[in-house]
Amino acid sequence: MRWLLRKDVLILARSRLLVALLIAYPVAIALLIGFAISRSPSRPRVAIVDETPPGQTVEVGTRRVNVHQYTEHLFSQVQPVNVGTRAQAVAKVRSAQVLAAVVIPPDIATRVSSGTIQAQLELIYNGNALVQSLVQSQLRSALAQANLGFSEQIQQAAAGAIDVLLRGGNLGVLGAPTNLIGLSSIPPLLRHVLARQPPGPDRAALERVAAFADFAARNLRLSKNVLSTVGQPIRIHSVLLHGRRTPLDTFAVVVAVTVSLMFVCILLAAGGVALEREERALARLVRGLVSRETLLAEKGSLAAACGFTVAFAMLAGVSAFVTLEWSRAGLWLLALAFGAVAFGALGVAIGALAREVRAASLLAFLLSLPLAFLALVPAGSVASGLYDATRVISFAFPFKPSLQALDAAVNSSSPALGVSILHLAALTAVFGLLARVGLRGAD
């Protein structure tokens, strides 16, 4: 096996342009995918649990603001899926039927009406950093726009109540006196009374009351301007079902590195095996020099070693621009190693089945990009049946488990690193067996 490995290394050393392209092309594709994943679906599917009673309103003075109008504005930027309970919403998020869920509590109107307690919506979501970023950006943008419209209605209602206090009249609030005297009318009345009041303690007391009433009336007019600062009557409380919040930039690094690892390993392994068959050297090799299993192991190991080196170099280089925890470097190496071996096994299987270098390279290329894109499809952005199909396809190939393993190693995300490693080990065995079957017909 040593001399076979030496032969392949010498072939690579003589083909410097090919090696350069083999490294540069995956890196370029990986960077393009890294930029692309920041784009979100225009209207993601979101489960809505509205626990408010029908027709509930926020009361401010004599005006009422309908909560239903606020929710319609809030969810105009998503595809709402109405469900009855929080448990049903959580089930839909877990099963990836929707991208996220929003729970509107029954006391939202009471909290907003209080003027002192901020109302709160519950946001429930799941998934990797890409899904988290889509949820946060879409719903926080919708919340900001809905808050703006809602706060304008509350401001108008409160301004009307202030006008009644200043001019006088009926507030329309239960328990409030009817035909109130306006605060702005109190200073002139007091001055009229003071003109007839003889000097003494009573006159001094009335003068103090008149001064306070005049000060209160002038400042109450200013309070209408203060209302314009009301910017967020309702906020979101986020609940992540499992894992931890992952910055999108570090997840983009993980995606780019995994794509590069996939391209280098698959192209090199497929081309190496197909080259032996195309040059009719395979039959001579397996007659006694090496076994078929040894030849496949050597081709896969060489491809895995090259891909591992390129991927780790990318991680090290990107760490100069994106903050990565080097204390977890041991886990990086573990995830990269298992991913590289699994991609190498897939590559030798392609090379064994394709038989020609051009066919193997084309098949490897045509297979790699769709696998990457399918693994990055967010839940809720496509129909549930189509999403289930993408999950099955992604499960059968190494890209998604390699992505999850490296994401767990770099970002402590879920699923756990051990689960992804076991998945990769199983795929390595399956594709290794498939490659052995493909070489059975070697002359």
Image (cartoon, rainbow, N blue to C red):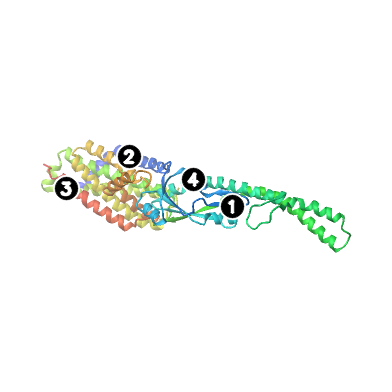
The answer to whether 253 is drawn above or below residue 210 in the figure is above
Q: Earlier in the sequence, mark 2 or mark 4?
A: 2
Under circle 4, the secondary element is helix
Q: Earlier in the sequence, mark 2 or mark 1?
A: 2
Residue sitting at the far right? 198
- Comparing marks 3 and 4, which lies closer to the viewer? 4
Q: Name the residue under label 3.
A: 436
The mark nearer the N terminus, 3 or 1, is 1
Q: Name the residue under label 4.
A: 72
Count residues near mark 3 (Cα–Cα under 10 Å), then give few for <14, some for 14-19, many for 20+.
some
Which numbered circle lies on residue 425? none
- Marks 2/3 in contact by CB < 8 Å: the verdict is no
Could you give the CA–CA distance between mark 3 and mark 1, rounded to whole angstroms?
Answer: 75 Å
Q: Is 91 in front, or is 107?
A: 107
Residue positioned 40% across, 58% down in the render: 327
> What is the three-letter code of the residue carrying label 1?
Glu
Disc 3 element: helix
> Percent position (x, y) of residue 144?
53, 47
